[in-house]
Every structure is written in C-alpha cells, then in structure tokens.
Image (cartoon, rainbow, N blue to C red):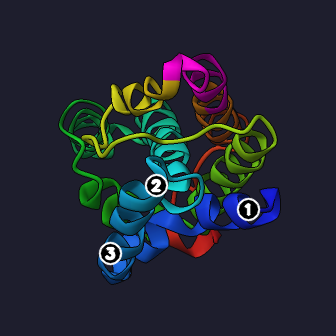
Amino acid sequence: VGPLAVGLIGGAWYFLVALGMDKALVPVILNSFASQGYDNLFWLSAVVATYALIGVAFAYFIRCKKEDRAMAGSNAITIALGGVSEPTIYGCIFRFKRAMIYLFTGGCVGGILASLLHVKAYTLGAGNILFFTIFAGGGGKSLIPGIICCIVAFAISFGLGLVFGFPTNKSAE
C-alpha cells in the first residue's frame, strides 16, 4: 500500500467518522485481519488519525476562550480517555476550518510516515490514548515505529493548534 494512500486516509479518517462512512470500511478491515493477520491501510490510518485528533483537542483546550473551556476540556477527556471522538469532531473540528486543516495535516503526515516505516495494525482496539497497543503483534516489529508515528501525528496537530490557534469569533474564518 502506498504511503500517500495511508496519509490521505489518515488525514480524512475523522471526516469519514463524522459522516458514518467508517462503518462501511469495517468489513474490509476485518477481512484484512482475517486474511493477512494485520491491516496496513484503513485501521493503521485510523490509529494515526486518532492521535492527530487528540492533538487538536488538547490544543483547543489550551487556546480556547474562557467560556468554551469546560466544553473543550470534556472533549479532550472523552477522546483521550474514553475514545469517543464525536464531541471533538462536532464541537471543534467542524466549528473551525483551521482545526480541520490541523487534523488533516497531522493525520496525513503520521500516515505517510507509518507507511514508510512499514507499520502494521494487528488487532482492533479502543480509540483512546492507548490505541498504539494494536501495533504490539507480529513480534513487536511495529510497536516502536507505530508509537513514533502516533507521536508525530499528535505533535503536528497539537503544534499547529498552539501556534496558529483558533479564531475567537466565527466571522474570523
């Protein structure tokens, strides 16, 4: 699978989630696990995208206005600990065009790097801060490179969110 494909899916994964289209890919992912014992496209992209989304959520929590702080904090907690992405998607990503760019960039770069490092996802898992554990199969060859890719996706999204921020009013975007 080409690095660009993994990167594009990693960047677009949570847009697919928001539209419910991720459910259509579950049979493909399960078939990949059943036939190859791993997935190196869709589920790999989802893992990296999750860390990019966590990065955006934490950056928004740090940079948001005081009146949005409670919502931003609960969004960051629900994605990081609970693996529930929808509050962050609808409360931050779809509110700000910049957040969409931060998410896409982090997920895309992390996905490209994961593909170049031949990272493989070996099982399904909860989409929270411990999502990286799905790289532990296959003799552990994907674990360290997978963690590195997740950190890169998080750092890019988080860094972009901190540096460029989020508009203080909706008319700013």
Q: Which residue is mark 3?
A: 27
| Along the viewing direction, whichever of 44 and 51 lies nearer the viewer | 44
Say few, some or many: other residues with alpha carbon within 10 Å of mark 3 (under 14 / 14 to 19 / 20 or more).
Answer: few
Task: Name the mark nearer the viewer: 2 or 1.
Answer: 1
The residue that appears at 27% across and 44% down in the rendered structure is: 75
Q: Amino acid at mark 2?
A: Trp
In this picture, residue 37 sits left or right of residue 69: right
| Along the viewing direction, whichever of 55 and 137 lies nearer the viewer | 137
- Is disc 3 placed on a helix, strand or loop? helix
Residue 67 on image: x %, y %? 28, 44
Q: Which residue is mark 2?
A: 43
For residue 1, the mark is 1
Residue 44 on image: x %, y %? 53, 49
- Mark found first going from the N terminus, 3 or 2: 3
Residue extending farthest to the front is 35
Magenta includes 92? no
